[in-house]
Image: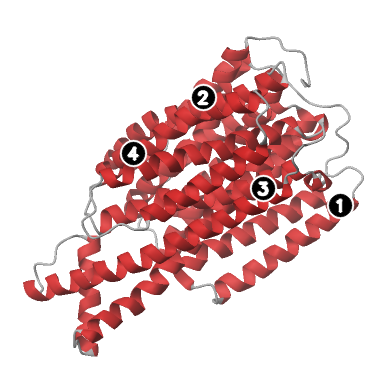
């Protein structure tokens, strides 16, 4: 199992690897708040704001497989530590940036650092485990401890972001520095002398393909799926990924062993990784927006409202890890987890205009449990199955699948909700006898209601009627969207069950 002999305490090394994974996990929650203040302070244009929001994610996609492949050849610990240093540099440049250009440079450096530190902290779990059963438990603990730390640090980081955006961008890097010192002492090195030459062409193809595809999907919610901003980069991205697949299939020393994904467990790991991240995006974003738009929750109430989901993730990770260690089949765990997520999304879809919070608690608990029942066995496969020379590359690919799933889930659910919302709203307003001019005024009222909550400049009765119509239209589009997303995840669950044989050869 191990690529090198164990030379340290497994628990100590595990905690160090959890720390190394945290900068990337912390970043979205902090960045989504801090980037608003940064954009205002640096007087960013709309284009610059868009670049600032997405460049870190695109750089993760561009470098995730390359850093994993370098780790296989140079040493996974060495490249992980280098990634933590790059994360620190990126955070400092971002925090001190006097201009939008330097801010974007800092975010780009941070993305490269996240790719190396997160992907290889995951791959190194195989090195510190002593047996397949211990590896399964370590993967589960890695996931659970991450979630626990993220809750605490994201609350602190989010609070800090509201005070100083510059200071907020140093939270993740400071955690990374502590992890770097700890990992340097506690984590053993791992690489394979038979890893072969570095496949530069293959890694360029996959980097360009992933960036182009993610860019296209991220534009879908605002531009529509039939827009040139979506179709052109999506077509280019798919063509590049197809070329990458063909190149890797024929290569004697591939950077990414695409042939390995003919293994049903790895194939299901990739498919389910996309599916549960679709569900994760819907819970994290669309449910949060429902709470804010319809129930007028404050940001802190939204954060606290997600706690049942997080608590379930922490508890279910250890449970799922013990089931994997006992030999419970992926054929049982993965479809069950995905179906649980699908059922939870469907239940959340039936929210009404005044649904109390406690009605969301059970679906949130079910969704968190389902996520970990799916994620834990598939994460274990990504480090247990690859040949020793490619643990870094295959382990890092799990992040790429997950990022695509999250971006696709966010884009698809957003485009469905808002694609249905405007026609439904106009239909309700027309049925109420509103003229085209009054319909345009109604849109302005809703924008003011959502953005500031201040509608004093409008007629009170009109505000009441428009908001009621808007809530009805939003809930109808939200309900249909949640049912569609639940059905999509359920279909993937059935495919996973069908692909996995009753007994996997070992």
Determine whether 323 is above or below 284 in the image.
Answer: above
The answer to whether residue 90 is seen in the rendering is no
Which residue is under mark 3?
Answer: 497
Alpha carbon distance from label 3 to label 4: 40 Å
Frontmost residue, 105 versus 171: 171
Compare marks 3 and 2 and give the one earlier in the sequence. Answer: 2
Image quadrant in which the C terminus is located: top right
Reply above or below: 234 against 272.
Answer: below
Q: Which residue is mark 1?
A: 249
- Residue 86 drawn at (x, y percent): 58, 35
Q: Indicate which disc residue 177 carries.
A: 2
- Front residue of 258/101: it is 258
Relative side of 342 to 497, left or right: left
Q: Nearer the viewer, residue 261 or 411?
A: 261
Mark closest to the chain's N terminus, 4 or 1? 4
Scheme of colours in the image:
secondary structure
Circle 1 crowding by C-alpha within 10 Å: few under 14, some 14–19, many from 20: some
Q: Is residue 145 left or right of residue 404?
A: left
Is 447 left, or right, of 186 in this rendering? left
Disc 4 vs disc 1: which is toward the camera? Answer: 1
On the image, the x and y values in percent for residue 468 come to 19, 69
Q: Which circle, 1 or 2, is nearer the viewer?
A: 1
User: Which dot marks residue 158?
Assistant: 4
Residue 28 appears anywhere in the view: yes
Between the C-alphas of marks 4 and 1, the distance is 44 Å
Q: Residues within 10 Å of mark 3 (few under 14, many from 20)?
A: some
| Label whose residue precedes the other's in the sequence (2 or 4) | 4
Q: Looking at the image, is mark 1 or mark 3 nearer the viewer?
A: 3
Mark 2 vs 4: CB contact within 8 A: no
């Amino acid at each position: 199992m191990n690529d090198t002999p164990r030379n340290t305490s497994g628990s100590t090394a595990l905690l160090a690897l959890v720390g190394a994974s945290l900068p990337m996990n912390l970043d979205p929650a902090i960045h989504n708040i801090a980037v608003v203040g940064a954009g205002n302070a640096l007087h960013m244009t709309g284009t610059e704001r868009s670049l600032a929001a997405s460049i870190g994610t695109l750089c993760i996609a561009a470098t995730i497989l390359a850093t994993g492949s370098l780790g296989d050849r140079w040493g996974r610990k060495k490249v992980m530590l280098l990634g933590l240093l790059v994360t620190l540099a990126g955070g400092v440049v971002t925090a001190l940036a006097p201009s939008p250009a330097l801010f974007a440079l800092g975010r780009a450096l941070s993305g490269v650092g996240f790719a190396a530190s997160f992907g290889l902290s995951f791959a190194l779990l195989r090195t510190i485990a002593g047996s397949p059963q211990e590896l399964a438990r370590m993967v589960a603990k890695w996931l659970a401890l991450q979630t626990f730390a993220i809750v605490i640090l994201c609350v602190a980081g989010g609070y800090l972001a509201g005070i100083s955006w510059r200071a907020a961008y140093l939270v993740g890097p400071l955690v990374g520095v502590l992890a770097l010192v700890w990992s340097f002492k506690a984590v053993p090195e791992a690489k394979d002398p038979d890893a072969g030459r570095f496949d530069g062409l293959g890694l360029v193809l996959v980097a360009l393909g992933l960036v182009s595809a993610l860019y296209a999907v991220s534009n879908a919610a605002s531009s529509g799926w039939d827009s040139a901003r979506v179709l052109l980069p999506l077509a280019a991205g798919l063509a590049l990924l197809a070329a990458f697949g063909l190149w890797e299939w024929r290569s004697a020393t591939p950077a990414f062993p695409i042939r390995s994904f003919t293994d049903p467990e790895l194939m299901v790991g990739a498919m389910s990784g996309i599916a549960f991240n679709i569900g994760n995006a819907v819970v994290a974003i669309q449910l949060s927006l429902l709470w804010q738009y319809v129930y007028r929750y404050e940001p802190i109430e939204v954060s606290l409202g997600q706690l049942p989901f997080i608590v379930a993730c922490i508890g279910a990770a250890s449970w799922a890890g013990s089931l994997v260690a006992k030999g419970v089949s992926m054929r049982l765990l993965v479809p069950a987890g995905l179906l649980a997520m699908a059922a939870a999304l469907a239940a959340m879809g039936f929210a009404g205009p005044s649904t109390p919070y406690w009605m969301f608690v059970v679906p949130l608990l079910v969704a968190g449990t389902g996520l970990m029942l799916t994620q834990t066995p598939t994460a274990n496969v990504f480090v247990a199955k690859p040949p020793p020379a490619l643990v870094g590359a295959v382990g890092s690919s799990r992040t790429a699948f997950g990022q695509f799933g999250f971006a696709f889930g966010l884009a698809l659910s957003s485009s469905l909700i808002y694609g249905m919302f405007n026609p439904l709203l106009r239909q309700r307003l027309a049925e109420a006898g509103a003229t085209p001019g009054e319909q345009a005024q109604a849109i302005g009222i809703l924008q003011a209601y959502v953005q500031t909550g201040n509608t004093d400049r409008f007629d009170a009765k009109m505000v009441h009627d428009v908001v009621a119509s808007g809530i009805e239209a939003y809930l109808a589009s939200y309900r249909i969207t949640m049912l569609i997303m639940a059905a999509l995840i359920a279909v993937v669950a059935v495919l996973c069950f069908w692909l996995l044989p009753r007994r996997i050869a070992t």
